[in-house]
Image (cartoon, rainbow, N blue to C red):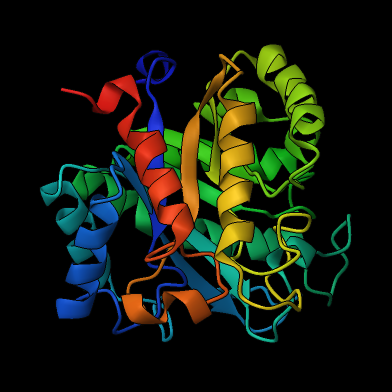
């Protein structure tokens, strides 16, 4: 698949395996989880794993160490997804051990002797991404996501362009970057990528407004677009703040269900919208009998599962 073919591809996808904790991506539970995900009528999956740097100003990303999944686990997940007939986007992501969101990883604009800086960080980050680019190439992944929600790093255009060039020297599939919500027009190097993707955690009553804004970016760059992340916790109040995983509130399947109904209805009106890698489906699922008390993003066993399953089933590309 190339960038031109992608313009007609519909991504009925799900993100699997986050955060990629070592020891969770193989075995009976992981296998059962992926099979249940495939039953959602998905045709793509984003396999999302995290490497953990110590602080927002650390310049070393120790991706070969715990808690990051092993290469054996990554290869198992890719092969298992493909055996289920799914196309795969490999999505390596950096997290911060002290809990700071990766969007706040940042350094001085100019290099200062004796201080941590972007140059050292991108060296380590490049090693991290290129490692998984090699695996993606060897295992035949259709897509590679080279970063996720790195808001402060987005402005480092030269370094991103250099990294993308290095990735393409190793990997022949589609390359995308997952910018954060509200940042679609603030990334100025979309031309170097095959696909524009973002995190679509928009309030339930703002879909038309936000899609109008995103459309400007899609038209400007002439690239395919999909939401690399989108979803809503099954929790009271979450439809208004779907990006807030810590929002207090009682479990509510209805809240999640109505959010998906609204998102699908709004996005289906846009001819440039090519799909979703919904957030998210863990490698170890809770019991279906516990779904009503689970207030996280996963829709397994909840009312929203039927909404998603039916929406994906009714896509023409899934009908034989």
> Looking at the picture, does residue 51 appear above or below residue 243?
below
> Could you say which is closer to the camera, residue 8 or residue 172?
8
Q: Position of residue 103 (x, y in %)?
A: 74, 61
* The quadrant where residue 226 appears: top right
The reply to whether residue 230 is visible in this rendering is no
> Looking at the picture, does residue 313 appear above or below residue 302?
above
Q: Position of residue 163 (x, y in %)?
A: 55, 44
> Could you say which is closer to the camera, residue 63 or residue 184?
184
Q: Position of residue 222 (x, y in %)?
A: 61, 13
Q: Residue at x 73, y 22 (%)?
A: 217
Q: Quadrant of the C terminus?
A: top left
> Could you say which is closer to the camera, residue 217 or residue 129?
217
Query: In the drawing, does residue 226 fall left or right of residue 133?
Result: right
Q: Quadrant of the N terminus?
A: top left
Q: Residue at x 24, y 61 (%)?
A: 36
> Looking at the picture, does residue 273 appear above or below residue 27?
above
The reply to whether residue 311 is visible in this rendering is yes
Q: Position of residue 136 (x, y in %)?
A: 29, 49
> Looking at the picture, does residue 114 appear above or below residue 202?
below
Query: In the drawing, does residue 112 fall left or right of residue 210?
Result: right
* The quadrant where residue 104 appears: bottom right
């Amino acid at each position: 698949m190339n960038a031109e073919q992608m313009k007609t591809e519909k991504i009925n996808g799900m993100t699997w395996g986050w955060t990629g904790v070592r020891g969770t991506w193989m075995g009976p539970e992981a296998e059962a989880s992926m099979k249940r995900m495939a039953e959602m009528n998905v045709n793509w999956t984003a396999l999302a794993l995290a490497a953990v740097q110590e602080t927002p100003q650390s310049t070393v990303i120790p991706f070969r160490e715990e808690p990051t999944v092993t290469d054996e686990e990554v290869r198992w997940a890719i092969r298992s997804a493909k055996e289920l007939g799914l196309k795969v986007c490999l999505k390596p992501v950096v997290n911060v051990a002290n809990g700071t969101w990766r969007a706040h990883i940042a350094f001085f604009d100019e290099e200062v002797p004796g201080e941590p800086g972007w140059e050292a960080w991108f060296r380590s980050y490049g090693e991290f991404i290129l490692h998984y680019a090699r695996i993606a190439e060897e295992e035949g992944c259709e897509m590679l996501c080279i970063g996720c929600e790195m808001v402060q790093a987005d402005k480092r255009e030269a370094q991103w362009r250099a990294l993308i060039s290095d990735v393409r020297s190793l990997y022949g599939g589609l390359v995308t970057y997952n910018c954060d919500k509200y940042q679609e027009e603030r990334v100025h190097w979309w031309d170097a990528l095959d696909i524009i993707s973002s995190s679509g955690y928009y309030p339930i009553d703002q879909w038309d407004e936000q899609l109008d804004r995103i459309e400007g970016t899609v038209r400007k760059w002439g690239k395919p677009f999909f939401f690399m992340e989108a979803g809503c916790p099954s929790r009271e109040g979450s439809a208004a703040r779907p990006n807030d995983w810590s929002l207090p509130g009682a479990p509510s399947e209805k809240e999640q269900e109505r959010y998906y109904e609204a998102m699908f209805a709004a996005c289906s009106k846009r001819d440039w919208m090519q799909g979703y890698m919904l957030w998210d489906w863990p490698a170890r699922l809770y019991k279906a009998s516990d779904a009503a008390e689970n207030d996280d993003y996963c829709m397994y066993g909840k009312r929203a599962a039927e909404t998603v399953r039916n929406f994906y089933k009714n896509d023409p590309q899934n009908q034989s």
